[in-house]
Image (cartoon, rainbow, N blue to C red):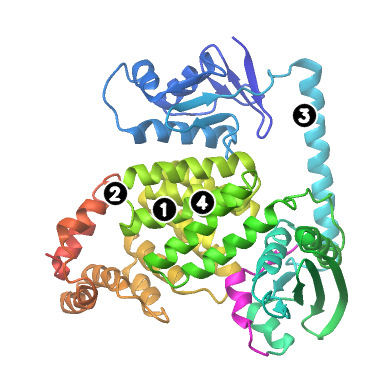
Amino acid sequence: MKNYEFAKNGLVLDGADGSLTTRSGDPVELRPQTREVLKFLAEHPEKTLTKADFAEAVWEGRQVSEDSLVQCIAEIRNAIGDADRRIIETVPRKGYRFAPPQPATTGHAKRTTLLAVVLVALVGVVGFFLWRSDGQTHPPVVAVLPFDDLSAEPDRGYLQDALSEGVITELARFPQFRVVARNSSFQFRDKPTDIREIGRILGAGYVVEGSQQLDGTRLRVTVQLIETESGVHVFAKRYDRNIHDLFSVQDEIVRQVSSVVGQTVLSEMPRRTSARDVDSRLRGLQARNIMSQLSYENWQKAMALEETSIREEPDSAWGYIGKSLMLGAAAALGWMEPRDEVLDEAVDLANTAMRLDPENYMSHFTLARILTRKENFAESILHYQRSAELNPSDSLILIGSSIPLLYLGRTDEAINSLNRAKEVDPLHGDWLRWQLGKAYWQNNECDRALEAMQSMASPVAAASMTVALIHICLDQPELARSAMNVFLESRPTHTLEAEAAKTPKNWKPDGMVERYLQGLKQAGLN
């Protein structure tokens, strides 16, 4: 049997016994079942192993829940740094496949690798102190405003926020500075505000603003970088291109801004997208805009746009991303049945997007959302983490990740993720506050939970159920019943039995499901 080395973290897998060690030979702790799953995979490289195969080899034919295998696979991927699932591949509707890396190096090659690691670390330390020597204790903060659309009819609105959102996503990859989430910076759309005031509100030292104009297939973009404390324009530039050069323009803007704000670009930016993606990306933004007014009719229109993208640009990930999200929404709202089959198709579509564009943060975000709906929480978290690595400025990723973290009982991690979302999204909305309320309730910090819920600007009726739970936690039964009545006014036929049916049975820690349902019953849900 061969040994395999995982380049991302230097761990070595013994193909004979499935043991995982560091380069120095120290063992990596895994649960016994997880270790057996890894051993079984190592014994059958390049072969698709079904769930029945795993049940027979690891669990000796005993009936186990699907989540047991999923948990083991997620732990293995987490241990070997396989967030993009290129080593332990998921084969849709079948099982898993081990695509082994190169055999582990030994002797001189190992020492050379170690020397390279040490040199990289030394360079990083020197760079850190050079950065600190400028007297700057925090990385600069950049906010990108939505670009004004100066297009005439019928082209007005076609580009939507594709360019400005793309600039935010790509800028967020640079560790030399921090980028404000679009949810905050886009709140200044169509609101004439002094740049210095925007900088103060968002805590940003620099603001990127601009305009876009589409005339048939010709695109004109102007962009300015402004230092907020003084209001001085650091640079201004105009681009005249073909519409299918949209992403090239985006990349040029990112290079210019990052070179000025970060002083230097430390590495070449890899090309993330190609011209073939432009049409699919724009259709996806149109679909999202349609879905802002949620209805079945709008869902049908949005779905048609995504299916057009898959049909006309089958090599672009965006259509598969959009359709997967649409199916997830339909399953949640009861618009398509049976639910499990709809979610299985959504997973297949998300996996196709992952194969086509594994460096697209939305591929990982989409798969994480669907896996959460399927209650595959451990694997969902891995994809949320990778999505956040690829786009650290998107607060929705961080908020979304708190859901599976809470269900796995990792409450402190969920709270940390939500607080990180607040940092990148200073003008955060009610979803973040609602999730904080749930997290603090789960952590028995019910005063803080109530404070979070009461800070919601426009709470939806469904949030009243969470408020009712918090009042039960605070021994305030009358207030709890009052909050529950608000919820029942919007959902008069909802019952405790229906709520129990949709509550994950594997919610950790043990006893959380009972606490949740008992609290609702005490608040008046029958």
Q: Is residue 200 above or below residue 284?
A: below
Q: Which residue was labeled with disc 1?
A: 328
Q: Is residue 2 above or below residue 276?
A: above
Q: Secondary structure at mark 3?
A: helix
**In the depicted view, which residue is nearer to us: 55 or 291?**
291
Query: Mark 2, mark 4: which one is toward the viewer?
Result: 4
- Mark 4 is surrounded, within 10 Å at the Cα level, by few (under 14), some (14 to 19) or many (20 or more) other residues, namely many
Q: Secondary structure at mark 1?
A: helix
**Which mark is on residue 114?**
3
Residue 3 is inside the magenta segment: no
In the rendered image, residue 69, in percent from the top left (x then y), is placed at: 39, 30
- Mark 1 is surrounded, within 10 Å at the Cα level, by few (under 14), some (14 to 19) or many (20 or more) other residues, namely many
Q: Which residue was labeled with disc 2?
A: 504
Direction left: furthest residue: 526
Among numbered discs 4 and 1, the one appearing first in the sequence: 1
Query: Mark 1, mark 3: which one is toward the viewer?
Result: 1
In the rendered image, residue 316, in percent from the top left (x then y), is placed at: 64, 47
- Say whether marks 2 and 3 touch (CB < 8 Å): no
Q: What amino acid type is highlighted by mark number 3?
A: Leu
Would you say 62 lies left or right of 22 here? left
In the rendered image, residue 511, in percent from the top left (x then y), is placed at: 23, 49
Q: Residue at x 34, y 74 (%)?
A: 450
- Magenta segment range? 177-192
Would you say 77 lies left or right of 111 here? left
Among numbered discs 2 and 4, the one appearing first in the sequence: 4
Among numbered discs 4 and 3, the one appearing first in the sequence: 3
- Is residue 194 shown to the viewer in this render? yes
Distance from disc 2 to disc 4, alpha carbons, whole Å, reads 20 Å
Quarter of the image for residue 492 reads: bottom left
Q: Secondary structure at mark 4?
A: helix
